[in-house]
Amino acid sequence: MKNGSPYGTHRVIEPQGVLPQGAWKIDNTMEICDNEILVDVAALNIDAASFTQIKKEAGGDPAQIEAIVRGIVEQRGKHHNPATGSGGMLIGRVAAIGPKLAGRIDLRAGDRIATLVSLSLTPLKIDSIKKIHLDKDQIEIEGQAILFETGLYAKLPDDIPEKVALAILDVAGAPAQTARLVRPGDTVVVVGGGGKSGTLCIYEAKKRAGPAGRVIGVSPFAKDCERMRELGWADHALQVDATDAVAMMEAAGAATGGRMADVVINCVNIPNTEMGSILSTRDLGKIYFFSMATSFTAAALGAEGVGKDVEMIVGNGYARDHALYALSLLRESPRLRRLFETLYV
Amino acid sequence: MKNGSPYGTHRVIEPQGVLPQGAWKIDNTMEICDNEILVDVAALNIDAASFTQIKKEAGGDPAQIEAIVRGIVEQRGKHHNPATGSGGMLIGRVAAIGPKLAGRIDLRAGDRIATLVSLSLTPLKIDSIKKIHLDKDQIEIEGQAILFETGLYAKLPDDIPEKVALAILDVAGAPAQTARLVRPGDTVVVVGGGGKSGTLCIYEAKKRAGPAGRVIGVSPFAKDCERMRELGWADHALQVDATDAVAMMEAAGAATGGRMADVVINCVNIPNTEMGSILSTRDLGKIYFFSMATSFTAAALGAEGVGKDVEMIVGNGYARDHALYALSLLRESPRLRRLFETLYV
């Protein structure tokens, strides 16, 4: 049995000298090294930006989606969408643990886990595609994957249905980062507040901002705004298109009496919402970009261009104990759990 | 005389409904609105990533560079490089001030100013190109430009030669942001520490980190490392290629006794240095990406992929009073001033 690097560099085929995420192609041979974990995969949860792009390219046709997904994995050895640069996560059962790890970690063969590292760096083989859930960004498959020594995972809990746990683990970074960002009394704007991660951010922001704070959800869709109002965690639901920077600024200004937001959390998965986010933030405020459609230069030059002294943070899907935190939210709020059970599974 | 929007949206030609920075093409007619400033341009300071790309495309030939620069401005009404998405800044003399602004701001016709907003949103007309400074990312021209009501500028000081002031104002955000980021005792890694903004970050980081702190400059070039050592502000100069993430991690680990950096400041202008920066940062540390070659998804997915709980910040070229701050550094340090007078003018 071969020795593997903790970061999986031994699997990189091309270009040489990079890590698996940066590689165009990685080795998806399903024989483990001494520090790898072999997983029998049950489902892929594709990153929303990636799945939207694939659906569009396929014209919504499931057979075409299957061909694109299989094509990506055959070409690259991983589900790393070349158009969006993003991946997703997977759920499965531990099939084998390398001897260097066995006994040193809290996993055994047979455990059900979700990977908390991106599919964009995870060696993957698809044997068959069983079902494509067009509206949930999920694909049920038969296949196998490899987890590296530094690869994060969550053991799936007994008290939460697997698919509900998977749905929240996919965006586990969102509430954990929101918890760090928002202070009592803050005015928080969540762009894309009607989506899955947006809903979690609104829930967590309201908890942290408290009674003196104000949480404002933004979506271009009436249905999303209605749901935000029904759930009751947002103080305002603004129906506005965040790609229209001027409209966004005016709506945020009206909702905050011209004060603008202390914190803007961007959870949309469409391009060109950087400037709308910047113009909705007060001077010296913070913007957290979870959206994988964020353009670095649009954000950097956008803020400079309008002379906004704001701190713009690249969303990190990982934060210490984020899986624990996300799952605990489902235990804490029956309403949130019901939402996940009905809408995201 | 027409009324203008404070953000310059009245100049947008296509697509409609966006701000000038996001527009493909803006109106560079040199007749001002009531809240605009007309500037007679003397020199363009092209963003380093953009100038590097243009030089490469032109094969280093000045005539070709001129053709590319003129082509961009003719097509877009601004010097907004479509390949890199970035711009630069300009220096010139105030030719006229719209009546809505005149008397309300500290400018008069005839004042020499530098614009502190990006060329990627500044209406520009080039009459002639006088000189291209290949090694300084500068182009002397005759032409005119428009500054919007929210557009930032700095009046050029009397005690500092114009070109020296321009050279430091171009990267004024770097020392101002470093001053906010670095705390006494911090270990700071400056990737690209041999360049212009990198040198300022090292200088400022050493000042802030103090005697208990440690500042480590990184460059792939022996010459840069030598200069860092001669200037004496960096405690270590590491000659390593930051695109080699594994080499970067090992070098930073060796220089910090495995502790890694509290703060990493990325000032390079080449792609694929995100992961090297991430792996050089300690858990819960911060990374400040000034490099316009930064990929948002590479940073976001990179940190998640290796399970690094770090805060990654999008470099904002603007911070309150950053021009004042940058110019004061030249008064504070004769060595820094000498460096700018000899190397960057």
Image (cartoon, coloured by chain):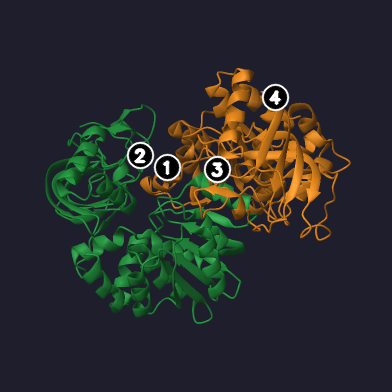
Chain colours: A green, B orange
Q: Do the residues bearing badges 2 and 1 touch, measured as CB atoms within 8 Å?
A: yes
At label 1, counting other C-alpha atoms closer than 10 Å, the crowd grade (few under 14, some 14-19, many 20 or more) is many
Instruction: Residue A292: give x, y in percent of width and height.
Output: 40, 50
Q: CA distance from mark 3 to mark 2?
A: 36 Å
Instruction: Residue B251: give x, y in percent of width and height.
Output: 51, 33
A129 and A119: which is toward the camera: A129
Q: Is residue B92 above or below residue A194?
A: above
The quadrant of the image that shows the C terminus of chain B is top right
B100 and B130: which is toward the camera: B100
Residue position marked by numbered label 4 in the rendering: B133
Q: Are marks 3 and 2 on the same chain?
A: no
Q: CA distance from mark 4 to mark 3?
A: 27 Å
Q: Quadrant of residue A315?
A: bottom left
Q: Do the residues bearing badges 1 and 4 touch, measured as CB atoms within 8 Å?
A: no
Q: Chain of mark 1?
A: B
* Amino acid type at mark 4: His
Foreground: disc 4 or disc 3:
3
* Amino acid type at mark 2: Gln
SS at mark 4 in the image: strand
Q: CA distance from mark 4 to mark 2?
A: 38 Å
Residue position marked by numbered label 1 in the rendering: B298
Q: CA distance from mark 1 to mark 4?
A: 33 Å
Q: Chain of mark 3?
A: B
At horizontal 31% and vertical 43% (from top left) the residue drawn is A120
At label 3, counting other C-alpha atoms closer than 10 Å, the crowd grade (few under 14, some 14-19, many 20 or more) is many
B171 and A96: which is toward the camera: B171
Residue position marked by numbered label 2 in the rendering: A21
* Amino acid type at mark 1: Ala
Residue position marked by numbered label 3 in the rendering: B25
Q: Quadrant of residue A319?
A: bottom left
Instruction: Residue A243: give x, y in percent of width and height.
Output: 46, 57
